[in-house]
Image (cartoon, rainbow, N blue to C red):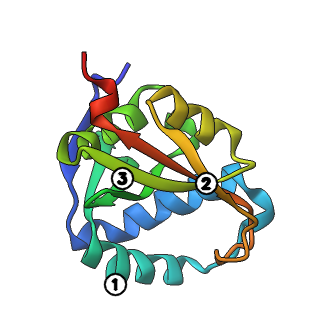
Amino acid sequence: MTDKVSLRKLDLADMPAAAAVHRASFNERLPTLAGLHTPEEDVGFWSAVVFKDCQIWGAEEGSRLVGVIAFLEDWIDQLYVLPEAQRRGIGSRLLDIAKSAYPVLSLWTFQRNEPARRFYEKHGFFAVDESDGAGNEEKEPDVLYKWEARLHRM
């Protein structure tokens, strides 16, 4: 499945590709919010904010970036896989990197993004809060998920 996919920590030069993966995945799942930012704004956000604050790992197929995760202590900031590369274990492998780094992780996802919600729940995350979206840029109701390693030890 993912034998041709390699994982590596990304650097600043990779941020345009990371921003493109983010935008393609975001637009596929939430087409009504497509165009919220220009590609230049996306690259600026990934370069100036996400890269500064987070560890960022990517999944590559050949030389093409197909998935990305950005995380910091106790928090997953971004996790996106290109639509055509989903359901192949790439998101799971990226998520495992963050899980191996921190014993507790939280993240927000939009309430209506059912595939993302199923993915996180399948990987041991549980809902702890919901919002009406007033506090996010998209004004989209979201749900806060949490994962704790201690709950998944055998």
Give the secondary structure at mark 3: strand
Residue at 58% x, 42% y is: 83
Q: Earlier in the sequence, mark 1 or mark 2?
A: 1
The residue labelled by disc 1 is: 48
Q: Tell me, yes or no, whether the two marked residues, 3 and 2, touch with CB atoms within 8 Å.
A: no
- 31 relative position to 84: left or right: right
Query: Mark 2: which amino acid?
Result: Asp
Real-space Cα separation, disc 3 to disc 2, in angstroms: 22 Å
Which image quarter holds the N terminus? top left
Residue 22 image point, x, y percent: 50, 59
**Dot 1 and dot 3 residues touching (CB under 8 Å):** no
Tell me the residue at 33%/69% (across/down).
Answer: 15
- The answer to whether 87 appears left or right of 58 in the picture is right
Question: Tag 1, which secondary structure?
Answer: helix
Q: Position of residue 51 (x, y in %)?
A: 28, 73
Of the image marks 3 and 2, the number of the one nearer the N terminus: 3
Residue position marked by numbered label 2 in the rendering = 129
The quadrant in which residue 117 appears is: top right
Residue on which the image places disc 3: 69
Where residue 72 sits: x, y (%)?
27, 62
- Image height check: is 5 above or below 137? above
Residue plotted at (28% across, 75% down): 53
- CA neighbours of label 1 inside 10 A, class few (<14), some (14 to 19), many (20+): few
